[in-house]
Amino acid sequence: MSHSFSRGRDRLAAVAFGSIVGCAMLLSGCAAAAQSIGAAVVTVPTDAATITEAVSMVSAGGLILVEPGTYTESVSVNKNDVTIRGTDRNTVVIDGEGLRPNGIEVIAGGVRIQNLTVVNHTFNGVLVTGLHDANGAQAHSLDGYSKLDPEKFPPLQRFEVSNVTASNNGLYGIYAFNSQHGVIRDNYTSGSADSGFYVGQCAECDILVTGNVAENNAIGYENANASDSVIVVGNRFTSNRVGLTLISWYQEAYLPQKSATVVGNLIADNNSSNSPKQAMGAFGLGVGLSGANSNLFERNLIAGNWSTGLQVTNTEDLPSVGNRLTDNVFEENGVDVADLSASRTPSSDTCISGGIVATVLPAGFAESCGTGSPGAAQASDLPAVTVPPGISFLKVPAGPRQPGMTGNLSQRPAALPRAVAMPDLALVGVPDRQLFAERVKG
């Protein structure tokens, strides 16, 4: 079997969305004025029959409050500082019916998506992207990819996706691409054919990923070319085929991936047969680092992954360099840490210190800090694991009910700040296996 976890296919296709409401008057600056005209609060379906209609009615900075029901639509949010919030996380459902590409597309700054469910979309549950034009939101195309021009497509600024359930989506559950200054918090993903959570293509990202649960996805969490200030803390990535990956990816800008911080996460039992097939056939893998640079893994519990707890390899000619594994606890993995880098692109300066690490391949890899790798193991050196066939993303069983937001849900929030308030990581310890256990199917 192959133990590669890096991408073997193109990612997201371009998708169309409803056109932005235009101005009727031919006045200078009327496009900007149009965003300020509208209702401060729009309730669906009382004031608007659909969420899409509500977007056209709400003012910039307004709140769309969605009552329980199933909404068979694809929503595009093109006004700054709008909040879309369900009144009940588990019964406000945007259903793609296996036909529509995205549940919610966010292409404006300062947008919040909160307290609802998105299911059965052929691409993504929630897509947040700064890559869009008159034809709609875009990330990758199925026929190839032209690298991002940061001047033509500047990163989207400020976003939040919280208390969202994203299940049975064909690529990603919650996908932030070419975006900065965002929070992905207290969400649940399952049944994603690519990854439950994805943060990609940003520099100086200033993105916090915390309090989330991913299970029964091909990959729980993936980071490609998202660098410098991505903080992944206090999440549960369990019972996927692969728990978490940090990769450099030639089809995205800002090579190589570097300087993410991964602290206090549970990354365990990623041996799910009740999940879509991972693109390159990986299975039983906790963490994959592919062409990943200068990342910090600290105080994570990485346990029960049948093949490897943490695997280091290259992306084509890009090595993994300077990663730090500090005070992590590895338990009951096939192999705790393995370097499978190609001989033409060896890893270097991988530092393993503190914590509990029982098995390392090749011998001497744990002492390679500050030096080149002593060589690399082969896939045949890992435990033999039978990879079960994948199932359709539409057939992965639904997860349990998830906790929703509390408080005054009809209150319009203040605008998101320019920078994310990050937690004090020094206060985060090694989690146990009960982290968010009440939120998984079991």
Image: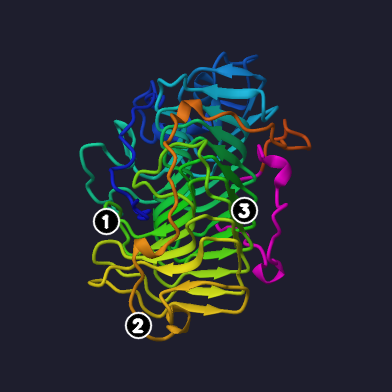
Q: Nearer the viewer, mark 2 or mark 3?
A: 2
The mark nearer the N terminus, 1 or 3, is: 3
Q: Earlier in the sequence, mark 2 or mark 1?
A: 1
Identify residue type, mark 2. Answer: Gly
Q: CA distance from mark 2 to mark 1?
A: 24 Å
Element assignment for label 2: loop
Say if residue 126 shows up in the picture: yes
Number of the front mark, 2 or 1: 2
Quadrant assignment for the C terminus: top right
**Residue at the image position 69 percent from the left and 61 percent from the top:** 431
Which region is colored magenta?
A: 414-442
Q: Nearer the viewer, residue 202 or 220?
A: 220
Q: Residues within 10 Å of mark 2 (few under 14, many from 20)?
A: some
288 in the magenta segment? no
Q: Position of residue 218 (x, y in %)?
A: 45, 43
Q: Nearer the viewer, residue 259 or 9?
A: 9
The residue at which mark 1 appears reads as 250
Task: Give above or below for 338 relative to 49.
Answer: below
Q: How is the image coloured?
A: rainbow
Q: Position of residue 374 (x, y in %)?
A: 36, 81
The vertical placement of 44 against 123, above or below, is above
Q: Is residue 234 left or right of residue 18?
A: right
Q: Residue furthest right?
A: 407
Residue occupied by mark 3 = 235
- Mark 2 and mark 1 in contact? Answer it, CB < 8 Å: no
Q: Which residue is denoted by mark 2 in the rendering? A: 372
Above/below status of 238 relative to 111: below
Q: What is the crowding at mark 1: few (fewer than 14 residues within 10 Å), some, or many (at least 20)?
A: some
Residue 239 is drawn in which quadrant?
A: top right
User: Foreground residue, 241 or 179?
Assistant: 241
